[in-house]
Amino acid sequence: MISEEKLTILTESAKYDVSCSSSGSKRKNEGGIGNGYAAGCCHSFTPDGRCISLLKILLSNDCIYNCKYCPNRLDADVPRATATPDEICELTIDFYKRNYIEGLFLSSAVCKNPDYTMERLLLVVKKLRTEYRFHGYIHLKGIPKADPRLMQEAARYADRMSYNIELPSEPSLKLLAPQKSKESLLTPMRALTVQAEAFKEEKRKGQVRGHFLPAGQTTQMIVGASPEKDGQILRLTQALYQKNGLKRVYYSSYVPVVQDKLLPEVGAGQLREHRLYQADWLLRFYGFSVEEILDEGENLSMEFDPKCAWALRNMHLFPVEINRAPLEVLLRVPGIGAKNAYKIMEARKYTKLSFEDLTKMRVALKRAKHFITCDGKFYGAKQEGMIRGLLAEAETQESAEQLNLFSMLSTPQNAMIALHGQL
């Protein structure tokens, strides 16, 4: 059994990785322990309100790399620990049986060399699946520069894998993480995407059985440790979604937990991180492209959320009639989230919608009323300057801090916004 001291070191060292979310896995229980299909696993809340959790731990924090921003870098004066694969397996099963967790998020510093580290990570997930018959959710961090065959085998046992890009450009990687390169991170991502498609086709033909990354891939970028603007970060994000089929890109606001002359003395702030997540949501669910949201050399507005900022730059397109506007137009109206846009499309098949109907649907009319008409009626401000002031006031009242469960329980409407990310 793993010691309490080792457990404390390895879980504390893992807390800076934010690349974990609900699994979306289709791995079913076939006679063993756990189930990644029914609930998934994360440090968050599902749309139906369930809290789901996982064991988040490093296999080792004894790193041979010297990334300037990393608390576990080679020259950092921190306690070191390395667990054995059996210790991680026993801990996972023990925690699961006690109902502490529903799955495992496993990463590691690069100890000895990339192949050695990846072999140990592979051994953990392989033992959990084959010896312990564990069918719960497993998110495994891949090790750049490790043998591709190890990566491919690990993908047969893990539900999700992630290779963290960390910094948005090659020059920043060379400066702050000289032992990593953009290509060493993107190459395994592309390979897994190709292999996943090939596996899906072979499975459709009945030529193979089992799973290959049923919950896909994710990555993480640190925001504010290097000088890249939000426009450059989001262009990389868009490319990752389009070319590598990633499920999520996570953004971690830089916090100066280690001191180095190459790093900023202050963090990037939670608001910038929050704005990136809002823009990311527009890319994935609202039909926006990065080019519409902002230019490459710009940062996102701190005053308005990205959809409001876009609408204010394109006032000539508004107001739109709520009873006639197509879905792609409704999705671009501030205050109308994706779920409500589909509700509106369905409801207006049977009746003409009024502002009262939108209120019942919990559309955020404080924002939306300036951009829509209902059956020809308009209740918003007519001057752009006044609209800006009212939107800024609404933004201040609602607070733009990163949403969490406890701060959002005040109203059901706010709780739903927190869960679904509607803008």
Image (cartoon, helix red, strand yellow):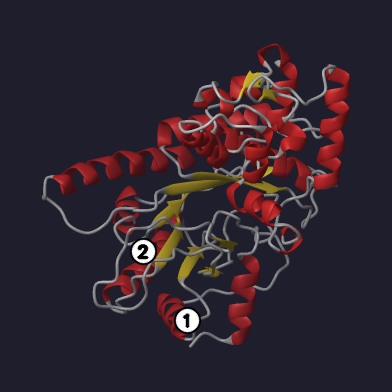
The vertical placement of 69 against 132, above or below, is above
Q: Image quadrant of residue 136?
A: bottom left
Q: Residue at x 41, y 36 (%)?
A: 244
Rendered-image quadrant of the C terminus: top right
Asked whether residue 93 is in view, the answer is yes
On the image, the x and y values in percent for residue 290 come to 59, 25
Q: Quadrant of residue 135?
A: bottom left
Count of numbered circles on the image: 2
Q: Which mark is residue 37?
A: 2
Tell me residue 268's x, y (percent): 78, 44
Q: Is residue 183 left or right of residue 193?
A: right
- Residue closer to the observer: 99 or 92: 99
Foreground mark, 2 or 1, reads 2
Q: Tell me if mark 2 has few (under 14), some (14-19) or many (20+) residues whose alpha carbon lies within 10 angstroms of its own.
A: some
Residue lying at 64% horizontally and 45% vertically, measured from the top left: 360
Residue type at mark 1: give it.
Answer: Leu
Question: Secondary structure beneath disc 2?
Answer: loop
User: Of residues 234 and 313, which is closer to you in this image?
Assistant: 313
The quarter of the displayed image where residue 16 is located: bottom right
Image position of 225 with respect to 332: above or below: below
Q: Which mark is residue 159?
A: none
User: Tag 2: residue type?
Assistant: Tyr
Name the residue rendered at 37%, 75% in the picture.
Answer: 34
Q: Secondary structure at mark 1?
A: helix
Compare residues 295 and 416 and report the one nearer the observer: 416
Residue 177 visible in the current orientation:
no
Q: Position of residue 316 (x, y in %)?
A: 70, 11
Q: Is residue 18 left or right of residue 68?
A: left
Q: Give above or below for 65 relative to 36.
A: above
- The percent position of residue 237, horizontal first and vertical second, equals 55, 34
Query: Disc 1 designates what residue?
Result: 91
